[in-house]
């Protein structure tokens, strides 16, 4: 056993081998369910039809930023600059996919996209298992319940099966954030690695830049008060410098990528992209604006399923559905907010990450659940891990997890049919 700043971690060789086997087993099981089993049950793999990151990867391999595609308006999410086609999406997922495109070619990569998303989700769910262990959830049954909650009781299940450019970035960003949170729970967190992981997540999903509030708190020594922050100011300053050094290349890359495409380091393309008329009208009210808050809060907390006719005719709303219906078990972790500074910082980071999307005009468009919540779910899951480490996972919580899995199985069913 060795000391850990949050408790004690086992390091016996047999325990490490068993833990590694469990990580591999979880990743493989999720991949087989999402990438093989569900497509076979449907009779075919579902593909949302927008492999933009693979086209971006092909463009990068050929030394250009514009996409060599026949797409033109009125196809959505396109930006035309002269004769060149761009999309507004962040570049890191395309960088990750470049080796695949280089090895098997663009068209074969497009055919493999459903398996790629399933593999990414498998690794992401396995990282959730690792994080829960770092948080002190020692009983494997409790850890497995919460891992199942993340992998099959949240929106990550249906966006994995549904596929498409919008979802690949969300899955990859969630995995990077879970990795960063697990690193923050190491005996000696490495600030430079937190900066790299946070920066990579930012280049998948821009709102995750606000997660640096939590990472900065960790590298400053996890102070419980301003007095604690002052007492460790020197060490905290060194840690913050290393954190920023890890993040800086990604921030500079963000500015350079925007400038190379649109001539401005601050122009991401979201204000320029083609949209259907109803979304264009919302964007005209502001890319980010308080007037969009009511709509997004409705999708996140209030919007329910469409219960018309007989039960076999019930369906989810395709613009979103409340987390209270889809993943109520995630809310149990909120009880920890009153019990530790760590929980409060996790909660703060999860809230800050969510705020930009609550003010965003897009609302998530076609979605089953509220997919933008996935940016914050790693922080919510960490709160659940703290709660499970202290109180266990009782039968009421397990019932809520079972409900969440059933609800998301229903959403996943619908996600492949619309």
Image (cartoon, helix red, strand yellow):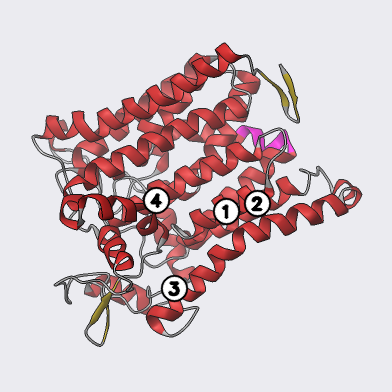
Q: Which residue is mark 2?
A: 192
Give percent across and percent down for residue 320. Answer: 32, 50
Q: Is residue 49 above or below residue 72?
A: above
Q: Residue furthest top?
A: 14
Element type at marker 2? helix
Dot 3 crowding, Cα within 10 Å, few <14, some 14–19, many 20+ = many
Magenta segment, prevailing SS (helix, strand or loop): helix
Residue 72 appears left or right of 122: left
Q: Is residue 272 above or below residue 221?
A: below
Give percent across and percent down for residue 169. Answer: 38, 53
- Real-space Cα distance between discs 2 and 1? 6 Å
Mark seen at residue 170? 4
Q: Are marks 2 and 1 in contact (CB under 8 Å)?
A: yes
Mark seen at residue 303? none
Label count reads: 4
Q: Earlier in the sequence, mark 2 or mark 4?
A: 4
Q: Which residues are magenta?
A: 335-340
- Determine the residue positioned at 38% across, 32% down: 151
Q: Are marks 1 and 3 in contact (CB under 8 Å)?
A: no
- Real-space Cα distance between discs 3 and 2? 22 Å
Q: Which residue is mark 1?
A: 196
Q: Earlier in the sequence, mark 3 or mark 2?
A: 2
Q: Which residue is mark 3?
A: 257
Mark 3 vs mark 4, foreground winner is: 3
């Amino acid at each position: 056993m060795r000391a850990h700043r949050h408790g004690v971690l086992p390091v016996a060789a047999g325990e490490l081998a068993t833990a590694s086997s469990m990580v591999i087993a979880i990743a493989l099981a999720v991949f087989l369910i999402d990438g093989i089993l569900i497509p076979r049950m449907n009779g075919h793999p579902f593909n949302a039809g927008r492999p933009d990151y693979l086209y971006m990867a092909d463009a990068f391999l050929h030394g250009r930023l514009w996409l060599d595609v026949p797409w033109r308006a009125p196809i959505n999410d396109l930006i035309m600059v002269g004769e060149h086609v761009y999309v507004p999406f962040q570049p890191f997922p395309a960088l990750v996919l470049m080796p695949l495109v280089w090895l098997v070619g663009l068209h074969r990569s497009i055919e493999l996209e459903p398996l790629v998303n399933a593999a990414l989700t498998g690794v992401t769910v396995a990282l959730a298992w690792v994080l829960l262990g770092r948080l002190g959830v020692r009983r494997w049954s409790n850890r497995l319940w919460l891992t199942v909650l993340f992998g099959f009781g949240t929106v990550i299940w249906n966006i994995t099966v549904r596929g498409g450019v919008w979802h690949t970035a969300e899955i990859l960003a969630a995995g990077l954030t879970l990795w960063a949170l697990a690193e923050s729970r190491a005996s000696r967190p490495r600030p430079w690695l937190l900066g790299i992981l946070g920066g990579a997540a930012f280049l998948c999903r821009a709102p995750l830049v606000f997660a640096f509030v939590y990472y900065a708190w960790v590298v400053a020594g996890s102070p419980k008060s301003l007095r604690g922050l002052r007492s460790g100011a020197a060490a905290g300053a060194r840690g913050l410098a290393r954190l920023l050094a890890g993040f800086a290349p990604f921030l500079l890359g963000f500015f350079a990528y925007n400038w190379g495409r649109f001539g401005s380091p601050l122009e991401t393309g979201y204000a320029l992209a083609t949209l259907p008329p109803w979304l264009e009208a919302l964007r005209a009210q502001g890319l980010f604006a308080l007037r969009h808050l009511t709509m997004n809060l409705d999708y996140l907390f209030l919007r329910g399923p469409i219960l018309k006719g007989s039960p076999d005719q019930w369906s989810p709303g395709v613009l979103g559905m409340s987390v209270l219906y889809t993943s109520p078990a995630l809310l149990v972790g909120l009880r920890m907010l009153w019990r530790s500074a760590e929980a409060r910082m996790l909660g703060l980071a999860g809230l800050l990450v969510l705020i930009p999307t609550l003010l965003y005009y897009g609302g998530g468009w076609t979605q089953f659940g509220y997919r933008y919540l996935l940016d914050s779910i790693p922080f919510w899951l960490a709160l659940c891990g703290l709660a499970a480490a202290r109180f266990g996972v009782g039968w009421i919580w397990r019932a809520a997890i079972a409900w969440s899995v059933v609800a998301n199985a229903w959403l996943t069913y619908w996600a492949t049919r619309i």
